[in-house]
Amino acid sequence: MRITVVGAGYVGLVTGACFSHLGNEVLVVEKVKEKVDLLKEGKSPFYEPGLEELIREGIKRGTLYFTTDLGEGVKFSEVIFICVGTPSLPDGSADLSQVEEVARLTAKEMDSYRLIVEKSTVPVNTHQLVKKTVQRYLKKSIPFDVASNPEFLREGSAVKDFLEPDRIVVGVESEKAKRILEEIYRPFTEKGVPLLITDPATAELIKHASNSFLAMKISFINMVADLCEKTGADVKLVAEGMGYDKRIGREFLNAGIGYGGSCFPKDVKAFIRIAEEYGVDFSLLKEVERINRRRVERFLDKVRSALWTLKDKKVAVWGLSFKPNTDDIREAPSIKVVEALLKEGAFVRAYDPKAAGNFRRIFPEGERIRYVPDKYEAVKGAEALLILTEWGEFAEADLGKVKELMELPIVIDGRNVFDPEDMRRRGFEYYSMGRP
Ligand SMILES: NC(=O)c1ccc[n+]([C@@H]2O[C@H](COP(=O)([O-])OP(=O)(O)OC[C@H]3O[C@@H](n4cnc5c(N)ncnc54)[C@H](O)[C@@H]3O)[C@@H](O)[C@H]2O)c1
């Protein structure tokens, strides 16, 4: 099939590259010219495992194209997937201006039936606004449908998540829209992936409810971690014990410095706001947010109590991205941690396998903060090592070498990467989250 994808971010680019990989012809529309120029050369504007390979494959096979021209995109295909950003407004609600813009411009360019699919995460009943907008800007009477098809991929494993989803959710209002989306997702359903067909409002709500539920799991285990610290219990084992229960599951029960990224913080906020607009006080989620906000402060308290004062202390930081295997630092807890370290006068030497470039834009390199290309270089002469992201290579680090290089062997682990007993045996002063 021919498919148009609007927005070449984490979701749009993965969607476009994967649909092309599955044998469709895909045109990705992206308004930032520099990104399109990079993509045409087969380069991804951000790091995502396996993505660049699929982009190159699509270009080589002639099934994946890029443009800055939405008009071209609207002409290219009957189906248009909207994958633009929906960031938070200051009041917590979702900023839907990018979605509105695509709906409006699509209406102006359409000359026959189009199916407009919201893949961006949007509040319940946004499809009504998209419909109204398209209707308003259509030059003549042209049939169209609006559908919701929320995306559940995770950065860091986005390609795999897209190609092997737990489920596909499609919210439609017409038989035609249903048929088109069933056809697009046939390669998945043939392999047994469940396809849940709902109305658009339900599909929109499923996405906000799913992300909010996962955020809630994280805040829940973080409170359990606090209780573990007071009682001498071990939160990792508590999570394991809970996780064997199929009704609970082990995933998203990792205690630490809290959730970040471009989705959970904004989606929880937007879900609270949209519930409020409909007169529902989702107080449970307000508490989820409050718990999450406190995590960085709790971690910093550990740092301060280990080092007494931070002024002129040499602090190594491992991990800047909001989670492993991505260069995305949007809403990463590391931003708040580094901000506090610098404010309190520490010298920071930071290492991240992929995210240092993005971090540098917020905290430019200078006397107080340096970015190094190697984790061992970061700990050279350090009086403490702070672990802020659980990149796989940290767990495999040569701890003997780390200890030798550090001035003081103090490790404050915000992601519970190491075993406390083992660290003590090796002579480290080791602090982690929710473990004795
Ligand atoms: N990132 C994730 O892990 C993830 C997962 C599931 C759902 N989502 C949702 O998907 C949506 C997109 O997220 P993202 O992380 O890919 O965002 P992003 O910011 O990485 O990408 C959005 C892209 O859309 C482009 N864009 C904006 N307006 C445009 C227009 N009029 N024409 C063409 N391009 C335009 C932007 O330039 C940008 O490159 C959001 O609603 C997000 O909540 C994200």
Image (cartoon, rainbow, N blue to C red):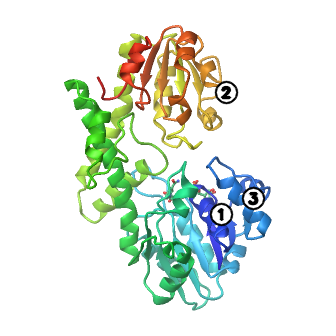
Residue 77 image offset from top left, x and y in percent = 66, 79
Which of the 4 image quadrants contains residue 396? top right
Q: Which mark is residue 56?
A: 3
Label 1: state its secondary structure: helix
Identify the residue at image location x=39%, y=23%. 300
Label 3: state its secondary structure: helix
Please state which of residues 114 and 128 is positioned toward the viewer in this rendering.
Answer: 114
Q: Which quarter of the image is occupied by the N terminus?
A: bottom right
Amino acid at circle 3? Arg
Identify the residue at image location x=60%, y=37%. 355
For label 2, the residue is: 373
Q: Residues within 10 Å of mark 1 (few under 14, many from 20)?
A: many
Q: Earlier in the sequence, mark 1 or mark 3?
A: 1
Which of the 4 image quadrants contains residue 204? bottom left
For label 1, the residue is: 17
Residue 250 image offset from top left, x and y in percent = 34, 47
- Please give left or right for residue 285 compared with residue 102 in the image: left
Compared with 10, 287 (above or below) is above
Please state which of residues 67 and 14 is positioned toward the viewer in this rendering.
Answer: 14
Please state which of residues 228 and 358 is positioned toward the viewer in this rendering.
Answer: 228
Q: Which quarter of the image is occupied by the C terminus?
A: top left
- Please give left or right for residue 353 compared with residue 220 in the image: right
CB within 8 Å, label 2 to label 3: no
Q: Is residue 216 visible?
A: yes
Q: Earlier in the sequence, mark 2 or mark 3?
A: 3
Q: Residue furthest top?
A: 407
Q: Earlier in the sequence, mark 2 or mark 1?
A: 1
Amino acid at circle 2? Pro
